[in-house]
Image: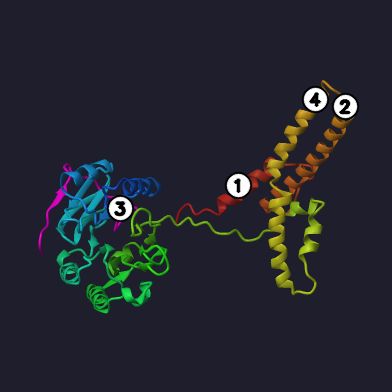
């Protein structure tokens, strides 16, 4: 395999790796441009990547070194661009532990060492637009070069697609190039990690006639790597100051997803004067029971947000208003203030009853102590119920 010049920053990391999260940003505009550098820094602030890869940097030499240093990463390597073509830059921070295995004009092979786990191989790829050079990439980038490491992730800009469905215009499709790419994927036993976001990772054009789009960037892995990282995700981020989309590869995403809560009837609603009006207006006698249940549930959820509101906020607001009115009454006795104070106290009493029902319902207890509004018992019972739902050990 032909070796190519690269720059390795001094003091390589020697601490255990925690390759916990993200990787990107492939296929960019000239790295020297101020708009691109600002975009890169913004993406780093938003996603805090452990490792960043820039492809097709189009600059080299001392100028490239100065730019690489300005990004603020603790470690980095560069594969020099040939003229204005190619160039692969890789940046990472501690505690990620990276070993450079070898470099090539079209890829960089890295060994990622993780604590309490065997190392795995990360290949960052920039496939040449030249078909003959791309064939050389597929011939020389192989799992067989890594001997003892079956866990392999290859990602970047392959400048190839796997089918005509991955291009916006059939004129952009090259069957020979596609066949070579698919044959390499099959030969190496790789699987596509898929993606979320825009369908195309490369887009160009100013109108419908000139628009071109294709999925040129992707992440591929061996089965062993996929089994090791079953929740790994690939996201196509927005294309900004480049004609390629950054790939955000998350090896261990958080599994805390926001899900829509199922409908739960709130007993406190029944004490509101407008509750039955909401039910009557949403119920259609000409429709079936199940459809009416769905309609009424949606109507009550909207009514809860727009009319009923938050009980605890309403109680706090009423107490504050009563306090203010009573302060005014102590200095200026007026009929309108007296009526307002009486009205506010009635509203507060109703709110306290609603709060009592709410805590009673949450506690799931079968009895209620009359008048024991917002009692310590209901708080304790609700907290105990939440604790019972947690798994603390197996």
Q: Answer left or right for 193 relative to 10.
A: right
Tag 1 or tag 3, which sits nearer the N-term? 3
Callout 4 secondary element: helix
Q: Earlier in the sequence, mark 3 or mark 2?
A: 3
Q: Residue at x 40, y 67 (%)?
A: 199
Q: What is the residue that sits farthest to the top in this orientation?
A: 331
Q: Residue furthest right?
A: 335
Which stretch appears magenta? 1-28
What residue is disc 4 on? 328
User: Given this view, does label 1 or label 2 mark the residue nearer the observer?
Assistant: 2
Q: Where is residue 296? Give x, y as percent.
A: 73, 64
Structural distance between the alpha carbons of marks 1 and 4: 40 Å
Identify the disc placed on residue 334.
Answer: 2
Up/down of 83 relative to 352, above or below: below
Disc ID at residue 19: 3
Depth check, mark 3 against mark 2: the one in front is 2
């Amino acid at each position: 395999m032909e070796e190519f010049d690269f720059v390795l920053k001094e003091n390589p990391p020697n601490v255990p790796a925690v390759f916990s999260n993200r990787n990107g940003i492939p296929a960019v505009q000239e790295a020297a441009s101020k708009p691109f550098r600002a975009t890169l820094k913004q993406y780093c602030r938003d996603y805090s990547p452990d490792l960043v890869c820039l492809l097709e940097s189009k600059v080299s030499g001392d100028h490239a070194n100065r730019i690489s240093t300005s990004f603020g990463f603790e470690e980095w390597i560069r594969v020099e661009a040939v003229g204005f073509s190619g160039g692969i830059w890789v940046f990472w921070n501690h505690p990620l532990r990276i070993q450079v295995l070898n470099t090539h004009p079209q890829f960089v092979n890295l060994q990622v060492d993780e604590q309490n786990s065997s190392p795995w191989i990360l290949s960052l790829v920039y496939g040449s637009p030249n078909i003959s050079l791309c064939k050389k990439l597929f011939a020389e980038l192989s799992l067989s070069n890594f001997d003892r490491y079956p866990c392999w992730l290859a990602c970047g800009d392959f400048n190839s697609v796997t089918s005509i469905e991955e291009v916006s215009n059939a004129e952009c499709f090259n069957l020979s190039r596609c066949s070579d790419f698919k044959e390499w994927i099959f030969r190496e036993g790789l699987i596509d990690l898929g993606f979320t976001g825009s369908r195309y990772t490369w887009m160009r054009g100013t109108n419908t006639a000139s628009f071109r789009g294709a999925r040129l960037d992707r992440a591929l892995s061996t089965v062993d790597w996929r089994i090791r990282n079953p929740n790994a995700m690939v996201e196509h981020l927005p294309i900004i100051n480049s004609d390629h989309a950054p790939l955000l590869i998350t090896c261990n995403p958080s599994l805390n997803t926001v899900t829509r809560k199922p409908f739960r009837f709130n007993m406190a609603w029944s004490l509101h004067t407008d509750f039955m009006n909401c039910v009557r207006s949403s119920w259609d006698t000409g429709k079936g029971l199940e459809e009416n249940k769905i309609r009424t549930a949606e109507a009550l959820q909207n009514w809860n947000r727009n009319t009923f509101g938050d009980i605890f906020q309403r109680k706090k607001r009423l107490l504050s208003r009563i306090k203010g009115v009573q302060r005014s009454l102590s200095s200026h006795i007026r009929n309108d203030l007296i009526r307002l104070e009486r009205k506010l106290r009635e509203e507060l009493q109703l709110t306290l009853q609603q709060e009592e029902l709410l805590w009673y319902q949450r506690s799931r207890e079968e009895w209620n102590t009359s008048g024991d509004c917002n009692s310590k018992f209901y708080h304790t019972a609700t907290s105990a119920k939440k604790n019972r739902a947690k798994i603390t050990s197996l």
